Image: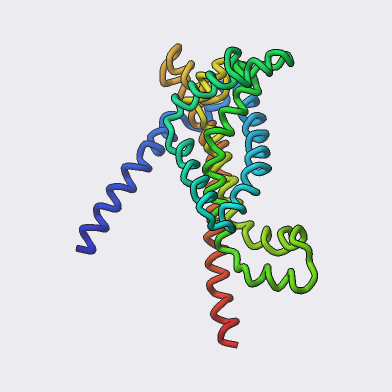
Amino acid sequence: MGSSFSLLGLVGLAFLLLPLVALLTHAPLSTMWETLSDRAQQAISISISSTLLAVFVIILLGTPLGWQLARNPSPKWRLVEFFLYIPLLMPPLVIGLLLVYFYGPYGMIGSVLAHLQISASNSDLAIVIAEIYEAMPYYIFSSIAAFSQVDQSLERTALALGLTPWHTFWRVTLPLAFPGLTVGVAMAFARALGAFGAVIIVAYDPHTLPVEIWISLEEQGLPTALPLALILLLIALPLPLLTVLWRTLYNLRKDRIEPSIHDK
């Protein structure tokens, strides 16, 4: 049974990784930058800047919500957590349609923004809104897990020693939850950077890198789209992969230290 399961596991691994090997073969790094047009370079710039802004907002809004959901067991907050699965599971194209309906020129918020000469469609703001909507649930659920793993007895000790709740959060809770929060940030970054379905509906122009890949595929075919796809992977993957690796090494080190402390 063990050998059969190992074989099936290897088949699954090959299924996931071989397409990436094919991409690296057909879009080598040596010629990747030569295929970049001015439009593609602008798309890369827009994607990076909008994603960084989206991640900043996600951290600002998602961290308090994740902490509240992790520490408050009341039915009201459990219901809030349940509803968070809706944007997480919703198809990206549907998200785009909802955002256009709500933030577009004829929507409730969109009409208010229009009076302020602000457009939430086909603009940088529209891109950021779509990326936040697609990526924020990933960070929130990661933050819930991170804060849930913090030993609350350490927080109570800090409070008993005279620290305020605010200082306890910054000096005790946040450092202990930091490894899990970094995983959430990395996931949100990759998800926001690769957002396509919602973005292309709310902001076909200016082009983000995923939208530019799709346009290049439609207009010029795979030879132009593949190098751009490789660039997207090179921007999106290092942070999540390094974060997961760091979290794994952190947990291994933690598991080695704790038994030695208990032995003493």
Residue 99 higher or lower than 238, as above or below = above
Task: Name the spot of residue 222 as percent of width and height, x first.
Answer: 41, 21
Residue 9 higher or lower than 239, as above or below = below
Task: Name the spot of residue 114 as percent of width and height, x first.
Answer: 68, 14
* Scheme by which the image is coloured: rainbow
Which residue does the image show at 52% across and 43% down from the upper left? 138
Res 105 visible: yes
Residue 50 higher or lower than 185, as above or below = above
Which residue does the image show at 31% across and 42% down from the upper left? 15
Closest to the observer, 2 or 158: 158
Quarter of the image that includes the N terminus: bottom left
Res 227 visible: no
Residue 56, located in which quarter of the rendered image? top right
Closest to the observer, 85 or 191: 85
Task: Name the spot of residue 177 as percent of width and height, x first.
Answer: 62, 59
Which residue does the image show at 48% across and 16% down from the upper left? 215
Q: Which residue is farthest bottom?
A: 264
